[in-house]
Amino acid sequence: MERKPEPGTQEGASRRSAPEPTFYLFDGHNLLYAGKFADPRELEDKLASFVALRGARGIVVFDGVGAAHTLGPLEVRFAEVADYALERLAAELRDHERVCLVSSDLTVRGTSGKEVDKRSSQLFMQELGETKLPPPPRMAIEDRLDPKTRAKLERIRRGEE
């Protein structure tokens, strides 16, 4: 008899074909540790790129104090206890957004509600590492030259100068 994955588990989430999340909630210090980032700003940049590439939005919450700020579609917030802030945000957003909570804290993941997708920080870091930015558009050197320089180079090429 084949074992079926329980709803709300990562195994169940990976097998179902659910729509992509529209809103990500990130446990900042969990991800700092899981990704071995030396600087929180590096993590913030990666997360901002991740949500932007997916056409989503997100909030990363760090324990402690700091200046809240925004990086494109990502809000960076600080809270005395990030876990409580993440639980509250999940409860506020889950009725009108497709929310994904990224935390390794089992208590936070357990109290966020069954409507919320959950990913451990370690699993998410693997996914984040696989995120590739599209290559920059190829630009030939001739496209970067002004018309006067192009004309002079063309004359040199033809042996006219």
Image (cartoon, rainbow, N blue to C red):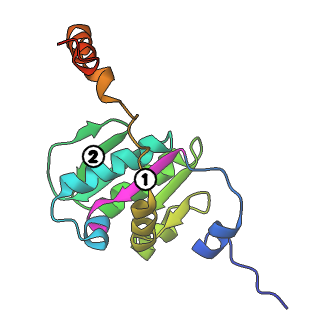
Which residue is more in the foreground, 43 or 148? 148
Q: Quick one: which residue is furthest to the top in this view?
A: 148
Label 1 sits on what residue type?
Answer: Lys
User: What is the residue that sits farthest to the right in this orientation?
Assistant: 1
Tag 1: Cα neighbours inside 10 Å, few (<14), some, or many (≥20)?
A: few
- Of the numbered discs in the image, which one, if any, rests on residue 1? none
Mark 2, Cα crowd under 10 Å, few <14 / some 14-19 / many 20+, is many
Tell me what residue is drawn at x 29 percent, y 28 percent: 141
Report the label total: 2
29 magenta-colored: yes
Residue 102 showing in the rendered view: no
Q: Which residues are magenta?
A: 22-30
The quarter of the rendered structure image containing the C terminus is: top left
**At 31% from the left edge and 72% from the top edge, which residue is drawn?**
34
Picture coordinates of residue 128, whole percent (x, y): 41, 60
In the image as oriented, which residue stretches furthest toward the front?
A: 159
Q: Is residue 39 left or right of residue 18?
A: left
Foreground tag (2 vs 1): 1
Residue under pointer 1: 132
Label annotation for residue 76 = 2
Q: Residue at x 35, y 51 (%)?
A: 47
Q: Nearer the viewer, residue 29 or 134?
A: 134
Quadrant of residue 156 in the image? top left
Residue type at mark 2 is: Val
SS state under label 2: strand
Residue drawn where x is 39% and y is 63% of the image: 129
- Residue 138 lies in the magenta-colored region: no
Say whether disc 2 or disc 1 marks the residue closer to the N-terminus.
2
Q: Is residue 6 visible?
A: yes
Q: Nearer the viewer, residue 117 or 92?
A: 117
